[in-house]
Image (cartoon, rainbow, N blue to C red):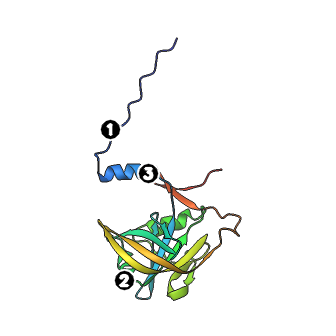
Amino acid sequence: MTAPSAPTVPPAPAAAGSPELLRSVFRQHAAGVAVITALDGGRPVGFTATSLNSVSADPPLLSFSISTGSSSWPAIGHSEHVGVHILAEQQRDLAGLFARSGADRFGEGTGWRPGPEGVPVLDGVLAWLVCRVVARVPAGQHRVVIAEAVAGHSLGEVRADGRPLLYHQGRFNALRD
């Protein structure tokens, strides 16, 4: 006869309403990975976002958030148009590059071209949109940017590898069958 195992004791809960509680809950929420781009005085800038949301189909609105401490915030804060790129599961390195502070995000290894409104459009993504910024809403140390899609293209339906990159448990992940 084996001895009964000791009951599993859950970790102490994070304080109600704390940043730690929010982070621990959202680690359980898988999110799509996007790269947001803009121009800053003619220079391309961009960052990785997991906060992308569809807001409205008519008019075609989306939202994302950005920290006001981000190196991309000055450009996003003043740009009339931004690029939104949905990454494929094999683009983990690209997501990491655009998430890394101080990285040369538009260096030799990054394929891109000027798109509509001059916005940088990344090569090889599942889908992209160029959007007109319609609002920047203060939210703590972040801004929620609401933007209207004005141009774009989706390659996901024609690519055999058209599976999205996800962010879950603090890591970039792929869908499982």
Calculate the distance from the C-alpha at mark 1 to the C-alpha at mark 3: 17 Å
**Quarter of the image where one finds residue 155:** bottom right
Q: Is residue 53 left or right of residue 74?
A: right
Q: Which residue is disc 2 drawn over?
A: 78
Q: Secondary structure at mark 1?
A: loop
**Quarter of the image where one finds residue 12:** top left
Name, please, the residue furthest toward the top: 1
Calculate the distance from the C-alpha at mark 2 to the C-alpha at mark 1: 43 Å
Q: Secondary structure at mark 2?
A: helix
Q: Which residue is disc 3 drawn over?
A: 27
| Between discs 3 and 2, the one toward the N terminus | 3
At label 3, which amino acid type do we have?
Arg
At label 1, which amino acid type do we have?
Ala
Calculate the distance from the C-alpha at mark 3 to the C-alpha at mark 2: 31 Å
**Is residue 40 or residue 57 the one in the foreground?**
57
- The residue positioned 41% from the left and 29% from the top of the image is 8
Q: Which residue is disc 1 drawn over?
A: 12
Instruction: Locate residue 87, reporting x and y percent.
Output: 56, 67
Instruction: Locate residue 159, reporting x and y percent.
Output: 69, 68
Instruction: Locate residue 38, reporting x and y percent.
Output: 45, 80
Instruction: Locate residue 111, reporting x and y percent.
Output: 58, 77
| Between discs 1 and 3, the one toward the N terminus | 1
- The residue positioned 50% from the left and 84% from the top of the image is 119
Q: Secondary structure at mark 3?
A: loop
Q: Count neighbours of disc 1 (C-alpha within 10 A) and say few if under 14, some if 14 to 19, many if 20 or more.
A: few
At label 2, which amino acid type do we have?
His
Question: Label 2 near label 3: C-beta < 8 Å?
Answer: no
| Looking at the image, residue 153 lies above or below residue 2 | below
